Image (cartoon, rainbow, N blue to C red):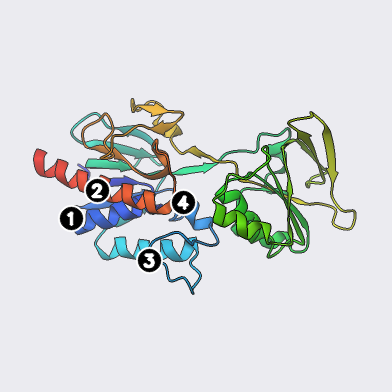
């Protein structure tokens, strides 16, 4: 018979790591299961300015913050394994999780904190050019576009922040936004409009991308006039970069047959992170919520772990 943990946490982003930290401090036998690297979306974020307690005269990046969170969870006895969970059984008293290799993990309670991933741009031929000019991670790929022209699709906080980061590398960065004004926070907009390497293409969407093995051109449509404009790479460059930051999609596909209540793929919980199944909670970007930030993910994780500890105390 396999070991039965007090708490299994799926995902090692800010929500999962915060849950692990709290679970460990509550003396729960806790296991975090993560299929990739710790951090989720925040692991590929260059700069963080809105996490409480940050020292303002020292730059904080996603990786540096996550490294400390990971160490904290480990310090309080939280175990971690790398595995890709494909099957879940949540209805019974013991929760079971099966990975791609057939390994089964069991626990009394569970927190689903699998996060979300970038939404595709949605243009014709997009898949053909991912990694060949199209990217969804400025921190990962900005250095490939040193002194090139780059375009960023989106108008929210992430899009504008990543566009500003890209100006450190590219000679020119143009934000393509379907509206005539940005949705980013005013403080972010103020910085952006002062950046002389940052330009804006309003009321526009990318319809199609083309090229011979690499991204060489794209067609942009004005949503108000319907006018189509072809943008071609500078002949001296031979290509340009196109980064998409138009929102997220939840990492919940593996839960499609779980019976959990969802809205658009996001897990439905109450204010205490409880799902429809007793002892099963959700935290962070994967659940229905109004604000997806590191601080709210960490708070979700703390609440979920506290509720898991209470559930065990009341039902053991």
The x, y position of residue 313, in whole percent, is 10, 44
Q: Name the mark nearer the viewer: 3 or 2.
A: 3
User: Residue tagged by mark 1?
Assistant: 26
Tell me which label, 1 or 4, sits earlier in the chain. 1
* CB contact under 8 Å: marks 1 and 2: yes
* CB contact under 8 Å: marks 3 and 1: no
Q: Quadrant of residue 189?
A: bottom right
User: Residue tagged by mark 4?
Assistant: 40
**Distance from Cα at disc 3 to Cα at disc 1:** 24 Å
Q: Quadrant of residue 197?
A: bottom right
The x, y position of residue 232, in whole percent, is 85, 46
**Distance from Cα at disc 4 to Cα at disc 3:** 21 Å
Query: Helix or strand or loop: what does disc 1 sit on?
Result: loop
Tell me which label, 3 or 2, sits earlier in the chain. 3
The circle drawn on residue 305 is 2
Left or right: 3 as drawn, with respect to 286:
left
The x, y position of residue 204, in whole percent, is 73, 37
Left or right: 9 as drawn, with respect to 156:
left
User: Residue tagged by mark 3?
Assistant: 53
Vertical comparison of 74 with 10: above or below: below
- Return the residue nearer the eye: 295 or 131: 295
**Distance from Cα at disc 1 to Cα at disc 2:** 8 Å
Vertical comparison of 300 with 261: above or below: below
């Amino acid at each position: 018979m396999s070991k039965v943990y007090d708490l299994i946490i799926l995902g090692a982003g800010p929500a999962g790591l915060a849950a692990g930290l709290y679970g460990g401090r509550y003396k729960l036998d806790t296991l975090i299961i993560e299929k990739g690297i710790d951090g989720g979306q925040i692991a590929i974020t260059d700069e963080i300015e809105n996490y409480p307690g940050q020292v303002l005269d020292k730059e904080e990046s996603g990786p540096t913050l996550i490294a400390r969170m990971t160490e904290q969870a480990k310090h309080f006895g939280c175990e971690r394994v790398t595995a890709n969970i494909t099957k879940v059984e949540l209805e019974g008293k013991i929760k079971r999780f099966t990975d791609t290799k057939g390994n089964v993990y069991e626990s009394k309670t569970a927190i689903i904190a699998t996060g979300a991933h970038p939404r595709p741009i949605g243009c014709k031929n997009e898949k053909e050019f991912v990694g060949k000019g199209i990217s969804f991670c400025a921190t990962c790929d900005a250095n490939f576009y040193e002194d090139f022209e780059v375009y960023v699709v989106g108008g929210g906080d992430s899009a504008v922040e990543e566009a500003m980061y890209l100006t450190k590398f590219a000679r020119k960065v143009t934000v393509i936004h379907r509206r005539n004004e940005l949705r980013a926070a005013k403080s972010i907009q103020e910085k952006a409009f002062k950046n002389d390497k940052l330009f804006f293409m309003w009321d526009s969407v990318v319809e199609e991308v083309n090229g011979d093995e690499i991204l060489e051109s794209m067609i942009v449509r004005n949503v108000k006039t319907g006018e189509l404009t072809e943008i071609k790479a500078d002949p001296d460059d031979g290509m340009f970069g196109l980064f998409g930051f138009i929102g997220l999609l939840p990492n919940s596909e593996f839960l499609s047959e779980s019976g959990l209540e969802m809205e658009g793929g996001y897990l439905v919980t109450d204010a205490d992170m409880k799902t429809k199944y007793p002892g099963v909670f959700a935290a962070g970007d994967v659940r229905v919520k109004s604000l997806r930030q590191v601080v709210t993910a960490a708070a979700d994780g703390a609440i979920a772990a506290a509720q898991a500890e209470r559930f065990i105390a009341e039902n053991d």
